[in-house]
Amino acid sequence: MREIVLDTETTGFSPEEGDRIVEIGAVELMNQLPTGRTYHQYINPMRDMPKGAFEVHGLSEEFLRDFPVFEAIADAFLDFVGDAKMVIHNAAFDMKFLNAELGWCKRRILPMDQAIDTLMIARTKFPGSPASLDALCRRFGVDNSAREKHGALLDSEILAEVYLELTGGVQPDFGLSTTSGTSTQAARTAGKRPRPLASRITEEERAAHDAFVGKMGDAALWSKLA
């Protein structure tokens, strides 16, 4: 099962009013384990950077000026995503921007049912509780201390850990970004103990237990299986 945990940063809230994507970050999961493959791209929005957006992600117009425009990276992005499910926090927002950008450069649109919205999962699982990414990190004990500002790749890595907590999946160590799914799986496979642990039951405790079971007669069904 291949999934892509994804996040974007933008110049604002509305592509209809001229806002654009300025960063995409994504992490690949295979059977709920990180494969080590990521996608990360800064994008030249070909417009100014509003002060409010800059305060969120810290990406300035000057910094982004030398990066490619969305059309130049659209095919590589679509190839990375493929037909995998996309795990996104507040999926409606990111999908709105992604499909606006894809439509402007005449690429295929991503169907909404390809997205898994962790915000909706959190609100369903914990009704009435805060469901922001930071709030979920606090709930699950996920380390987000490096998140001084929003960043698409870092937020994707954090969201991947939160997603697995939300769904009861395997909890990998995303700090080891070069760890492959195979080696992570091997690390999770525990070997048998070479020698059994010594019993901690005293003879007095064993005798008291046997006496108690003896008083139960036929009710002690497990004694018949010994």
Image: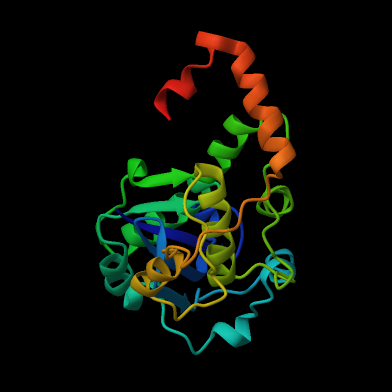
2 relative position to 11: left or right = left
The answer to whether residue 165 is visible is yes
Q: Residue at x 69, y 64 (%)?
A: 143
| Quadrant location of the C terminus in the rendered image | top left
Q: Looking at the picture, does residue 210 appear above or below residue 180?
A: above
- Rendered location of residue 184, percent (x, y): 42, 70
| Colouring style | rainbow
The quadrant holding residue 33 is bottom left
- Rendered location of residue 110, percent (x, y): 31, 51
The answer to whether residue 130 is visible is no
Q: Looking at the picture, does residue 119 appear above or below residue 39?
A: above
- Rendered location of residue 79, percent (x, y): 26, 68
Q: Total marks drawn?
A: 0
- Give 118 or 72, whichever is nearer the viewer: 118
- Rendered location of residue 145, percent (x, y): 74, 69
The quadrant holding residue 159 is bottom right
- Give 133 or 70, whichever is nearer the viewer: 133
- Give 153 or 138, whichever is nearer the viewer: 138
The quadrant holding residue 30 is bottom left
